[in-house]
Image (cartoon, rainbow, N blue to C red):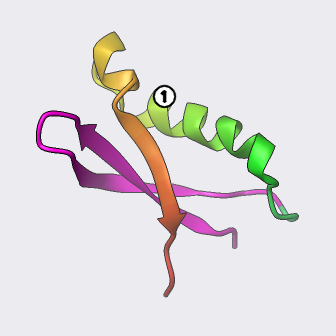
Amino acid sequence: MGKVYKVYRVDYLTKMKIPIGTVTERRNRARDAGSQLGLMKLARQMFAQSAEDRMRIIVGEECTA
């Protein structure tokens, strides 16, 4: 099973990150810093409710069991 990352919606007025779900990494190898963009695109496709909302979704740290 892959790593699980938390997904947040950022409220820029209050400067708070609101947890909205998780994304599971399906790669066998670890991602480098440059390829985190693909994981963020996946999270935005899954959780965005509008075009404006896409820019507010970020991927956070890895969840530990």
Part of the protein shown in magenta = 1-27
Residue that lies at the very extreme toward the right in this rendered image? 29
Q: What predominant SS class does the magenta segment belong to?
A: strand
The picture places residue 17, in percent across and down from the top left corner, at: 26, 51
| Residue occupying the point 51% across, 83% down | 64
- Placement of 65 over or under 18, stated as above or below: below
| Residue occupying the point 28% across, 41% down | 10
| Residue occupying the point 49% across, 87% down | 65
Q: Left or right? Give the position of 8 relative to 38.
A: left
- Residue 8 is covered by the magenta coloring: yes
- Residue 20 is covered by the magenta coloring: yes
Residue 12's image quarter? top left
Residue 50's image quarter? top left
Depth order, front residue of 6/11: 11
Q: Amino acid at mark 1?
A: Gln
> Disc 1 on helix, strand or loop?
helix
Q: Left or right? Give the position of 2 relative to 47.
A: right
Number of dots carrying numbers: 1
Residue that lies at the very extreme toward the top in this rendered image? 51
The picture places residue 24, in percent across and down from the top left corner, at: 58, 59
Residue 1's image quarter? bottom right
Residue that lies at the very extreme toward the left in this rendered image? 14
Q: Residues within 10 Å of mark 1 (few under 14, many from 20)?
A: few
What residue is disc 1 on?
Answer: 45
Depth order, front residue of 16/24: 16
Depth order, front residue of 12/3: 12
| Residue occupying the point 56% across, 66% down | 4
- Placement of 28 over or under 32, stated as above or below: below
The picture places residue 33, in percent across and down from the top left corner, at: 76, 51
The picture places residue 7, in percent across and down from the top left corner, at: 41, 51
